Image (cartoon, rainbow, N blue to C red):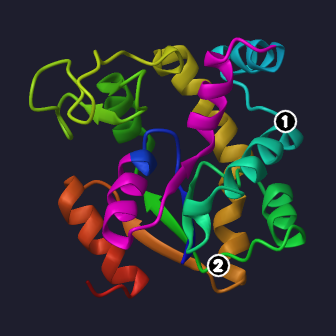
Amino acid sequence: MILTLLGAPGAGKGTMARQLAKKLQIPTISTGALLRDEIGSGSMLGKEIDALISNGNFVSDETIISLLLKRLEEADCQKGYILDGFPRNESQADQLSQLGILLDKALLLSIPDAEIIARLAGRRECPNCRATYHIQYNPTKLDGVCDECGGALQIRADDTPEIIKKRLEIYHKQTEPLIQYFRQKGLLAVVQSEQGVDDTVASALKTLGVTL
């Protein structure tokens, strides 16, 4: 199964992708994580990406697709995968088809902007394994410590109020049209993301028609 997750920044795409990956036994590929890994490499490209993201801007389609295709060549993607954060616009969605990447479903996590702002203020990320948490909705067992690898959690640079507002503006303008795009193609599935993580995942599996 090949899925993509849609939703505004902070809608819970990272958490949903991680949970679905465990249930479906396929990898989740976060374009955000790919970008941050490139930043962490210290390359010239990484520095350019860092400057864009730190100011709340998106990276070019060419760069995203290059990093994505490199990741899809790995063996664990052969039986399917979950795309988290791609495509972000109709142009990217068209490019997926042109590259022969045929999606089974586009899963939309629907949530109001006010809830998103509240969520992002409490989001935390592990710099080592990229696992994401929330101090209220998805806390770690030990405060400030990653459940997966024991790393010290951090607040992401793009989770400041000013950057959050800008990211939401960009989402509504550039990414939200994808909802209608996938609806017209019969690929859209919608889940309300205001409930708890377990309930949201259960709803998603039901919506996708997956029986475990």
Part of the protein shown in magenta:
15-43
Tag 2's secondary structure?
helix
What's the residue type where badge 1 is placed? Ser
Q: Nearer the viewer, residue 133 or 129?
A: 129
Tell whether 34 sits left or right of 208. Answer: right
What's the residue type where badge 2 is placed? Arg
Picture layout, residue 65 above or below residue 185: above
Tell whether 99 sits left or right of 37. Answer: right
**Residue drawn 77% across and 53% down?**
69
Which callout, 2 or 1, points at the residue further toward the start of the chain?
Answer: 1
Q: Which residue is under mark 2? A: 183
Pointer 1: residues within 10 angstroms few (<14), some, or many (20+)? few
Q: Which residue is under mark 1? A: 60
Quarter of the image that includes the N terminus: bottom right
Q: Quadrant of residue 32?
A: top right
Q: Quadrant of residue 141?
A: top left
Q: Position of residue 55 (x, y in %)?
A: 68, 15
Tag 1's secondary structure?
loop
